[in-house]
Amino acid sequence: MKVICILCDQAFKPDKRTEKKLRKHPHKIQLCPDCYQRITHQVIERQKKKGGASLPQTLSQTETNLHSND
Ligand SMILES: [Zn+2]
C-alpha cells in the first residue's frame, strides 16, 4: 500500500499503524515522515515563540502591579 504525501507529492509506504488508520479513514490527510517531522518542528517552534511572546507581557503586567503598590 502506498500513500501520496499531500505536501511533497511523493509516494511513501506508511507503517503498519498508519496503514490501519488509513483503512478506517481513507480521506484523512497524510504526510510522509519527512514532511511530518518538518511540520512538527515548525509547530513546536511556533508554540515556543507564542510562549515567548506572552511572557514579557506577563512580566510587564507584574511590573505595573509592583509600581502601583508602591
Ligand atoms: Zn512529504
Image (cartoon, helix red, strand yellow):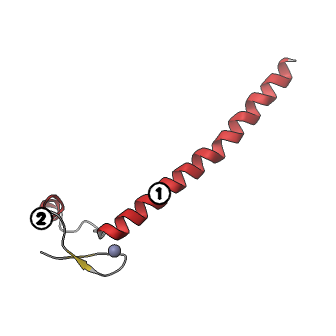
Ligand 1 near label 1 (Cβ, under 8 Å)? Answer: no
Hey, which residue is sitting farthest top in the picture? 70
| Residue 51: numbered disc | none
Give how far across and how far down residue 58 sits, in percent.
69, 35
Label 1, residues with CA under 10 Å away: few <14, some 14-19, many ≥20: few
Task: Identify which residue is drawn at 18% across, 61% down.
Answer: 18
Give how far across and how far down residue 45 sits, in percent.
52, 55
| Residue 43: numbered disc | 1
Helix, strand or loop at label 1? It is helix
Q: Is residue 20 left or right of residue 66?
A: left
| Residue 23: numbered disc | 2
Q: Earlier in the sequence, mark 2 or mark 1?
A: 2
Q: Is residue 5 left or right of residue 39?
A: left
Q: Is residue 45 left or right of residue 61?
A: left
Residue 7: quarter of image: bottom left
Label 2, residues with CA under 10 Å away: few <14, some 14-19, many ≥20: few
Residue 16: quarter of image: bottom left
Question: The disc labelled 2 sits on which kind of residue?
Answer: Arg
Tell us which disc is closer to us: 2 or 1.
1
**Taking 37 as reference, is 5 above or below it?**
below
Q: Is residue 44 left or right of residue 61?
A: left
Give how far across and how far down residue 38 sits, in percent.
42, 65
Helix, strand or loop at label 2? It is helix
Task: Identify which residue is drawn at 71% across, 40% down.
Answer: 57
Q: Where's ligand 1: which quadrant?
A: bottom left
Task: Identify which residue is drawn at 85% across, 24% down.
Answer: 67
In the picture, which quadrant includes the C terminus? top right
Question: The disc labelled 1 sits on which kind of residue?
Answer: Val
